[in-house]
């Protein structure tokens, strides 16, 4: 099973980012992919994420969503984790407080699926989710995920 932290950049943890809707949240998360994503065309990635979201919500319940995209704009898989200070409606009456965005290159389907599975393992853990939401600093969030990832 892959180690999530290997795919999260230095700025890949966001705590209480400002947003008005999914578009503004995703727009604030994409730059945090940094060198893990190596693309400057965030607007096209944003459009791709929103198109994916229109097909069906990436909310998985338990106040969590895992928006994800394969794109030829991405040369290396990256993950950004955001914990929101208030719920965001992801449609289908599924409010979200934790968002794990995954962007990967076209052709990396196996790795993409393994990472999605690993993220879901974390997010289906009630205690872990509660501890994520209770974090008060980015360092605390990063440490929490790194410790859980090391198991």
Image (cartoon, rainbow, N blue to C red):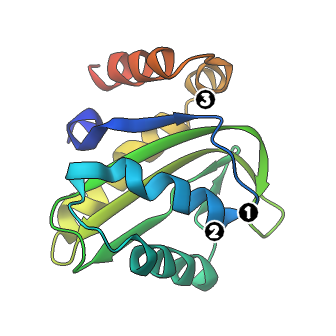
Classify residue 35 as left or right of residue 64: left
Q: Is residue 108 above or below residue 130?
A: below
Tell which circle, 3 or 1, labels the residue nearer the N-terminal end. Answer: 1
Using the image, tell me which numbered label, if any, was put on residue 21.
1
Disc 1 is placed on an element classified as loop
* Residue 15 found in image quarter: top right
Residue 140 in the image, given as x and y percentages of width and height: 49, 14
Q: Is residue 111 above or below residue 16?
A: below
**Residue beneath disc 2:** 23
Residue 134 in the image, given as x and y percentages of width and height: 67, 18
Residue at image point 56% right, 17% down:
137
CB-based contact (under 8 Å), mark 3 and mark 2: no
How far apart marks 3 and 1 lie (CA) works out to: 22 Å
CB-based contact (under 8 Å), mark 1 and mark 2: yes
Tell which circle, 3 or 2, labels the residue nearer the N-terminal end. Answer: 2
Residue 102 in the image, given as x and y percentages of width and height: 38, 57
Classify residue 30 as left or right of residue 36: right
Disc 2 is placed on an element classified as helix
Classify residue 79 as left or right of residue 20: left
**Residue beneath disc 3:** 129
Q: Quadrant of the N terminus?
A: top left
Disc 3 is placed on an element classified as helix
* Residue 83 found in image quarter: top right
Label 2: how many Cα within 10 Å (few below 14, some 14–19, many 20+): some
């Amino acid at each position: 099973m892959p180690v999530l932290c290997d795919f999260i950049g230095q700025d890949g943890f966001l705590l209480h980012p400002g947003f008005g809707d999914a578009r503004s949240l995703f727009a604030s998360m994409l730059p945090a992919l940094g060198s893990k994503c190596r693309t400057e065309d965030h607007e096209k990635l944003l459009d791709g994420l929103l198109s994916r979201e229109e097909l069906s919500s990436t909310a998985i319940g338990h106040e969590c969503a895992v928006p994800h995209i394969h794109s030829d704009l991405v040369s290396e898989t990256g993950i950004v984790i955001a914990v929101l200070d208030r719920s965001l409606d992801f449609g289908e009456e599924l409010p979200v407080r934790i968002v794990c965005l995954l962007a990967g290159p076209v052709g990396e389907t196996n790795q993409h699926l393994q990472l999605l599975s690993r993220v879901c393992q974390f997010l289906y853990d009630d205690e872990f989710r509660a501890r994520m939401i209770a974090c008060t600093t980015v360092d605390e969030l990063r440490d929490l995920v790194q410790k859980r990832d090391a198991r």
